[in-house]
Image: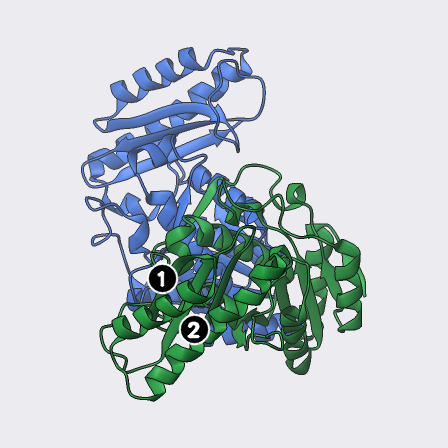
Chain colours: A blue, B green
């Protein structure tokens, strides 16, 4: 596996690959890799000649009071995991390499961001879009892979690719879970043992919603209320949101009749966890 | 020459070219082609395997009171000129093809736009940047070509390419002029005979500035004033701006000591003309 730290070298590599007819799969990450990322890598390897993974904790997508500084990092472990999982190039730029000056080109996402995480993290998806624009230009991928756990991110990337006409195919890969159902996340490491045992109830709450829908309940408000009560009863975390929306448009709805997302975010002491089911 | 009207077909073509190792030169235009455009095409042919030219009058870069509707168009003449000048693919999308829905991703340029045309055309360069992002993704060029006459546009594209890490090389091509010195422009067609004879004084004014600088004048205010008096005396047009700035940063300056641009814009009855010299 080749480790590349500069934009210029990464760009030369990907242009060379494209020129020789190789297809490129790209898995952008913020590192602290886990089985969720490995699932993305696996999917990419199945359909592309070359697998590029990036590790970059993007300051632009963190708010001033968020966890940019203490976001978990473990470079050597990430290198080992990437090597074991068939990554051809691991792109690990510094913040200075990616943002040598303050960005004077502002990307603002107007749709799909006034709900869910976008509501409690203003500017978050503008930062995500900015870094992805840059990374897509640097790695020239044919296919990109994102986890379903970050469903709103997938919806925004879908919009970014379509509206700006990127010649890129987006793949949404199933969320990987712990044995008890907790969605794998780099931030799980910041849960206390007590919180870790409670965290499973995010997924359990979503499963209750799913069961309700399968049983014929069509009123989102009733379902949201039930999940809310369940999570309040079973965890000490503070609920940030529980929402049911259309997917991927993330439009509100009053009757459940098409593809929807049930999404939840809970703030624990040191970690904010999110999870969702698309039904 | 192949004429392509859909994004999908254009994108397939350019991806195929890239995959087979061909280099792509791209000349984006708003049509009503003239020798200025032909110079860009010629330059592109010299250094690329494939030449793509686009004709698209981009509504996003026109203000509500500007000349989008009456911007000159002549499709058949453009096709003839493109054919004669070695264009391989002429990309001519409709407005609906480029903007099927209202853009929900906003691009805002913060630098280099509070001067010159950016000052009198708010949002103009945001619209330019948006359409170029799309066109660059659709045509996957290795090299893009812009005329020096639109120097602020070149400065903004330079920033767009660098800051968003496009794997694209920008070329600025010398302004092509009529025999008397008037810069070629699609908008010249809207000058009355009297205005046409006056319009040459934009360039003459710039030449006066250049001579002053060669003679050792280092104070931009003195030069601007002299050019202003000259143009007021010799034309009936209304001066929009005469400015001397650093190039390409477009920063203000008090002493002429590095590469600078002297730029002028004059509003005639039906046409707003711009011109500049980079010294």
- Viewer-proximal residue, B262 or A277? B262
Q: Kindly identify which chain the residue marked by label 2 belongs to.
A: B
Tags 2 and 1 touching, CB below 8 Å: no
Q: Which mark is residue B205?
A: 2
Both marks 2 and 1 on one chain: yes
Q: Label 2: few (<14), some or many (≥20) within 10 Å? A: many
Name the residue at the bottom extreme. B215
The image shows residue B32 at horizontal and vertical percentages of 68, 59
Q: Secondary structure at mark 1?
A: loop
Q: Residue at x 39, y 70 (%)?
A: B230
Camera sees residue B18: yes
For mark 1, what is the residue? B112
- Viewer-proximal residue, B213 or A17? B213
Q: Which mark is residue B215?
A: none
Query: In the figure, residue B248 lies in which quadrant?
Result: bottom left
Q: Residue at x 53, y 70 (%)?
A: B200
Left/right placement of residue A44 relative to residue A99 reads right
The image shows residue A15 at horizontal and vertical percentages of 57, 72
- How many numbered marks does the figure carry? 2
Query: In the figure, residue B163 lies in which quadrant?
Result: bottom left
Left/right placement of residue B233 relative to residue B99 reads left
Q: Residue at x 24, y 40 (%)?
A: A271
Mark closer to the chain start, 2 or 1: 1
Quarter of the C terminus of chain B within the rendering: bottom left
> Comparing marks 2 and 1, which lies closer to the viewer?
2
The image shows residue A4 at horizontal and vertical percentages of 42, 73
C-alpha separation, residue under disc 2 versus residue under disc 1 = 24 Å
Q: Kindly identify which chain the residue marked by label 1 belongs to.
A: B
Q: Give the answer, above or below, for where A16 lies relative to B138.
A: below
Quarter of the N terminus of chain B within the rendering: bottom right
The image shows residue B68 at horizontal and vertical percentages of 58, 46
């Amino acid at each position: 596996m080749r480790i590349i730290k500069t934009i210029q070298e990464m760009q030369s590599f990907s242009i060379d690959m494209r020129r020789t007819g190789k297809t490129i799969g790209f898995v952008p990450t913020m590192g602290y890799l886990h089985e969720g990322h490995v699932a993305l890598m696996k999917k990419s390897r199945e359909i592309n000649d070359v697998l590029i993974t990036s590790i970059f904790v993007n300051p632009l997508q963190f708010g001033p009071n968020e966890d940019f500084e203490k976001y978990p990092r473990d470079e050597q472990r990430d290198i080992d995991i990437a090597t074991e999982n068939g990554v051809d190039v691991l792109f690990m730029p510094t913040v200075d390499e990616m943002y040598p000056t303050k960005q004077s080109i502002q990307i603002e996402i107007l749709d799909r961001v006034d709900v869910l995480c976008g509501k409690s993290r203003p500017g978050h998806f503008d930062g995500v879009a900015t870094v992805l624009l840059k990374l897509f230009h640097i790695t020239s991928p044919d296919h990109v892979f994102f986890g379903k756990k970050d469903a709103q991110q997938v919806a925004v990337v879908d919009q970014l690719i379509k509206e700006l006409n990127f010649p890129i195919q987006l793949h949404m890969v199933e969320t990987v879970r712990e044995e008890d159902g907790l969605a794998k996340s780099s931030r799980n490491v910041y849960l206390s043992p007590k919180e870790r045992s409670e965290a499973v109830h995010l997924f359990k709450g979503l499963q209750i919603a799913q069961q309700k829908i399968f049983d014929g309940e069509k009123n989102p408000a009733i379902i949201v209320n039930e999940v809310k009560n369940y999570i309040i009863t079973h965890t000490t975390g503070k609920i940030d949101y529980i929402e049911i929306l259309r997917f991927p448009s993330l439009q509100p709805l009053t009757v459940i009749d098409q593809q929807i997302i049930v999404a939840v975010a809970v703030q624990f002491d040191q970690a904010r966890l999110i999870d969702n089911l698309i039904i």
